[in-house]
Image: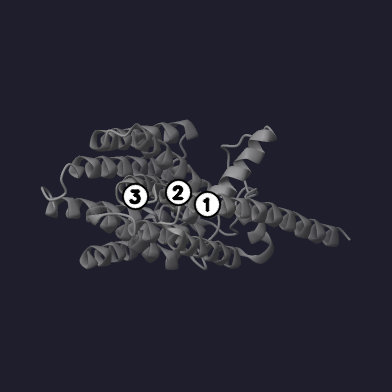
Amino acid sequence: MLYAVMAAWLIGTIGTALAIRYAQARAMLDQPGERRSHQVPTPRGGGVAIVVAALVVGIGQLMSQWGHVGGQSGLVLAFLAGFGLVAAIGWADDHRPLPASVRLLMQVLAAGVFAGALWIETRHMGLALLAFVAPVVLANVWNFMDGINGIAATQAVVVAAFLSLALPGLWMVLALAIAAATWAFVPFNFPRAQVFMGDVGSGAIGFALGCLIAVAVARGLETTPARASVWLLALPLSAFLVDATLTLAGRILRGERWWTPHVLHAYQGAARVVGHGKVTMGFLAWTLLACAVALTAWSHSDIFVLATVASWYTLGAVLWFLLQRWARVHQSVVRSGNGA
């Protein structure tokens, strides 16, 4: 396992450096604009290194353990295939923007393959539904939330590392490999962004985390006395899920084209006031605290666990509203001052 994690970090480091050179040579640059949070043209597609690292480790682990992972070989293959498909469509989009419907279709197809494999493995329709919904949702959430330096990468590192604690064997190695490869990407993206991970990275990472969630829930239902404890796996996702969900809901209610790029997330508004670094670190602190709460509440009574999850998400929603209001007020004051 140690060698696999080290290999993932090394591939992530070298691969990101190569991805920057590739993007510069092909003018794969994100330009500044009203719907962007950066100020200078920046290469994109650096997340391809994370994808390659995860695939290399995953295929290597599967080959070395073939015959020793029981019927889960098919499930791992389905995961790697879906992960690769989502990454491929993201990589194509990074070269030349594709319609959102095409990307979504590929994500749905990839998730369907994984969900079908999990259903064959468990014969549990609820788990199969989770395995279909979670990867599609998180692929898009990570894409929506990948808007300032370091935020998507640091969140992915913590969430993947946390999920590794709830995963068995090969799945634990996969989670740690994703965490290590993404950690290798962070210095290239934070505090100053030399490269963005692009759709190839954000979509594939979100997809992978959704699949790992489904496998962790399946294992938790088998091994945890308090079955409601699996809900605690949602706590480390709270920062992204709250901001993405409430922002999306607001855009839909206002009749906006919610699938188009924008800068209306709470994290984007806050970044315009205090800068990318402080917001990324603030979100990171929230997620680390969420992990601590989840570990503390694990195996408590079902009522305690459900109350903890509900309270945590309620607190997150309240903080989201306060953050949005604070950012709007501050920017209004700045605009008024400039006008004066």
Task: Name the residue rendered at 30%, 59% in the picture.
Answer: 177
* Residue that sits furthest to the left in the current view: 67
Q: Secondary structure at mark 3?
A: helix
Residue 231: give its label: 2
- In the rendered image, which residue does mark 1 sit on? 309
Image spot of residue 23 (x, y percent): 41, 54
Pick whichever, 108 or 49, lies toward us: 108
Q: Residues within 10 Å of mark 2 (few under 14, many from 20)?
A: some
Q: Residues within 10 Å of mark 1 (few under 14, many from 20)?
A: many
- Mark 2 vs 1, N-terminal side: 2
Say how the picture is coloured.
one colour
Task: Name the residue rendered at 39%, 45% in the picture.
Answer: 210
Q: Position of 224 compared to 64: left or right?
A: right
Q: Secondary structure at mark 2?
A: helix
Query: Considering only vertical position in the picture, is 11 above or below 134?
Result: below
Residue 86, picture quadrant: top left
Query: Considering only vertical position in the picture, is 95 above or below 291?
Result: above
- Residue type, label 1: Val
- In the rendered image, which residue does mark 3 sit on? 220
Task: Name the residue rendered at 30%, 48% in the picture.
Answer: 219
Q: Residues within 10 Å of mark 3 (few under 14, many from 20)?
A: many
Separation of residues labelled 2 and 1 (CA atoms): 7 Å
- Image quarter (top left, top right, bottom left or bottom right) of the C terminus: bottom right
- Residue type, label 2: Trp
Task: Name the residue rendered at 52%, 68% in the picture.
Answer: 191
Residue 207, picture quadrant: top left
